[in-house]
Amino acid sequence: VLGRAAAAGGPRGRAVAGGWRRGRAVVRPLWSGGTTAMPGRNKATCGYGSPELAVGQQAAEGGRDAGGRSPHGDEEEERGGAGPEHNLGDPDIVKSPSDPKQYRYIKLQNGLCALLISDLNYLDGAPTSSEEEEDNDDDDSEEGSDEYDDSGAEIEDGKEDDDDDDECDEGDESEDSDGDNEDFNDSDDSELEELAEKEETRKRGCSEKQSAAALCVAVGSFSDPEDLPGLAHFLEHMVFMGSLKYPDENGFDAFLKKHGAFDVQRKYFKEALDRWAQFFIHPLMIRDAIDREVEAVDSEYQLARPSDANRKEMLFGSLARPGHPMKKFFWGNADTLKHEPKLNNIDTYTRLREFWQRHYSAHYMTLVVQSKETLDTLEKWVTEIFSEIPNNGLPKPSFGHLTQPFDTPEFHKLYRVVPIRKVHSLTITWALPPQEQYYRVKPLHYISWLVGHEGKGSVLSFLRKKFWALALYGGNGETGFEQNSTYSIFSISVTLTDEGYKHFYEVAHVVFQYVKMLQRRGPDQRIWEEIQKIEANEFHYQEQTDPVDYVENLCENMQLFQKEDFLTGDQLLFEYKPEIIADALNQLSPQRANLVLLSAANEGQCHLKEKWFGTQYSMEDIDSYWSDLWDSDFELNPDLHLPEENKYIATDFALKVSDCPETEYPVKTLSTQQGCLWYRKDDKFKIPKGYVRFHLISPLIQQSAENIVLFDTFVNILSHNLGEPAYEADVAQLEYKLVAGEYGLIIRVKGFNHKLPLLFQLIIDYLSDFSFTPAVFEMITEQLKKTYYNILIKPETLAKDVRLLILEHGRWSMIDKYQTLMKGLSIDALSAFVTAFKSQLFVEGLVQGNFTSRVSAALAVPVKLHFAPLAHPCPVQFRVVDLPNTHLLCKVKTLNKGDANSEVTVYYQVTALIKLKECEDSHLGEEVDRNWNEVVTQQYLFDRLAREIEALKSITQADLVNWFQDHRSNQRKVLSVHVIGYGKHEGDSEVTAVSGQNSSSGEIPHLVLLPPSSLMRDFTSIKDIKAYTSTLNVLPYHKILK
């Protein structure tokens, strides 16, 4: 799999799902410098600048000689024998018992360290034959071989169909990484769209062609010269623009497209490696490309500016002491890389080449290569190709002497910040000495587990009872920004209610009381071992992951951990050392903390502005009452205590014996007027895990915009009610999700099957006995307003909302929902809606995995809930309007007046689009997703994949060309949606800073439709969406059943 190019390395690093994992330290490694997964520059993302990696130990060489040569010698055939004797792994590298791959570590003569991964699938002792795969390619010629293929409640906003995958989800990875919106997930992806995205990921990670490579350069923006901020990031762009051996600037991308696009055909993988390695051996970095790529860097900077997470990072970095590299502007933009260098007579091109020669050295690099080849073959390839990367012989840049960068008066203050989004949050941050060296103990992981706990006795449990907080996250994200050789961050971020914002000092005091309680008690071995057991269980039965993500992760791990811990160092707890935990814990004193209060209500109080992102903020001393209290020996809170023993941790991992005939696809085991249940016992992956999914369908939801908002409110209150009782299951790797679908409530539960029924029963009990107080109702509806608003101010989600409003018959838009909510809901209306919803339902379910049919029958929702069948069927149907044979244009103004970014979506209404290809499932979840898609769309064609593969084989190149030409003709049906940002070039007055204007005024946004530009006069412009769509015919709903 030749995926995206990863970031040039930097404080932010790759975004972790949801920012921080609830109640647990994030276990992703530090983003060091350029971690680059093939292909090159065109998919580059931006997370920049961490200095280097504080390794602390040198990995051993794994028994290979200095040249990395195999004992089998160079006379081995290119793809010689594939038997076990050619695939001997390194016994020192600890791997999961469920991991079928073989690993070997080598160190080349130039100092580059490589991890080789052989992913041969052995069936009855026979490996996959590479020749078989090559024989399956119909045509090796240039002309004929082209393949083009490219926990809490979730409020989802609509769906169009299962093939809608044009959303821009890779834009701002870190938008929610500060944890401001966990309980009110602002993702507007529906159940179907999420399944479609998973399918796209599955195809890219297709195990039939499972090859991937990633290389990490242990250098980043800490090494940026003072007079050229962003140079490390800029080099990451420039290095992929052709090489001496392959000079075509776009040659690598063209090669990938020609030989599989996302999935390079296995027989071309060696050549792909060679083309990719040349970027590190002899990149061209031609002078003519400088200005063009500066614009690309500047574009990434502009896209990053409206992100609260990015803005908080830049503000935080500015608090470092003078001379520390954290104060650097690691993004880079047109000013720092083009305009200012010209004014100061700096030759950016020369300095770029000097930076490459100094920092892109083989002995700073770690490489991971995974493919369906023997380890001997991979070793031969890697030695032959990557030994040419130059080694400059210079010591790696070191910053470990720059200790205590935040031990300054500016750090120990209260900062009020105006955010982009509607949110109240309090973040308490400490800067500790570097903790990476203690990865075998993981002291911050232990502390974050307790601070982030949501069960009885926790900080969040107490704050929720006060109606002061919605969510809490604690820990260290282990990105280069939060952990490097100069410091480690420990942060606690609390998502506040409106009332909590008024009492933010009291919220901080509760946090300090809990930390003080932990300090007095000292480390608890029972809890540490409980965490260790949960992580060990997950590692032992881990499922296969996307190869690109996997090799990216591992090449970073190689910079951080000893060889035996490459696969385990970021996951497992190895040694209980209470003195190390206590040392970190005792540094978390109120006097050493930094407080950041994020709220739109701060507007008007913040007269300072951060230089690069324009963030409005103010700095003030901690209120004297609270600073005096925190300097004293303040009392502990008796309501705060350690969690009890976790009853959800699995202990039975036995594979169940089937109690019914085995089937390849799910079978219907229950069918009544109230619903049906589908069941399949896993006989393929053989892991002690299960999946339970139910769709509770009601016709009430789509009857009005008010009903949709009432339904969203209901689902979020239900999730809030479950937060504390279900938390133990959550940390025990039992995952649940409640989705407010367009036609009903979707309940999804997965994890080790032993205790999974307990969690599912808990959810059903809380659904059956649903209740709420007026205070909870007010808290949830106020937060829901923020969630809707935050969705609307993003150009990409606004574009999607407008597009679906045009296309989908009878759709209620996000603006409809927001306006309805702002007008006000009543408690009585919610109570009446919930009663009506629960009284009549049609329930469909799927139970799959390590369950017997008897257990699956006991999980059937109709038995647990008392409801009548629907009076009339409520089919899950989506009606789409029939667009005219022309090019339609709908042009609207973005709703965020401080956002200069624009969004363009072009939609083609076509007759059919086949996008699947033959690709086996890599883990049980993929098979479940495919089966669930059939259930949730009420199509039940569980062998659809096999049928589509057969259909695909019958399609000729001529068929595809004819289909494409038909949809390019004058009869094509096209809809373009433009969301236009603010800026002088659009006739707007200059907006000096991006801020949350109108976010606290209660103003209800409305769409402003714009006329087409002079270049688009021939397009049919939509001036009134509802009036225009009312004139269009509605296409009949259809299901593809054969």
Image (cartoon, helix red, strand yellow):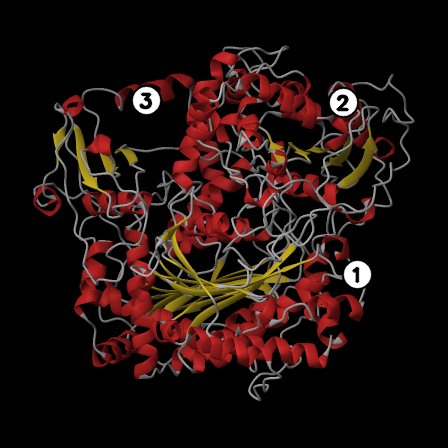
Task: Identify the element where label 3 is drawn.
Answer: helix
If you read the primary sequence from the N terminus, does the residue marked by circle 3 or circle 1 appear first? 1
Three-letter amino acid code of the residue under disc 1: Phe
> Which one is in front, 200 or 935?
200
Task: Identify the element where label 2 is drawn.
Answer: loop
If you read the primary sequence from the N terminus, does the residue marked by circle 1 or circle 2 appear first? 2
Quadrant location, the C terminus = top left
Which tag is nearer the camera, tag 3 or tag 1? 1
Label 3 crowd (10 A; few <14 / some 14-19 / many >=20): few
> Which one is in front, 714 or 1007?
1007
Which tag is nearer the camera, tag 1 or tag 2? 2
The numbered disc on residue 392 is 2
What whole-number distance in Å separates the C-alpha atoms at marks 1 and 2?
Answer: 37 Å
- Residue at position x 37%, y 41% in the image: 167
Report which residue position mark 3 lands on. Answer: 964
- Residue at position x 24%, y 80% in the image: 827
Any part of residue 272 in sight: no
How far across and how far down the image is residue 353, in percent? 61, 19
What whole-number distance in Å separates the C-alpha atoms at marks 3 and 1?
Answer: 57 Å
Which tag is nearer the camera, tag 3 or tag 2? 2
Report which residue position mark 1 lands on. Answer: 574
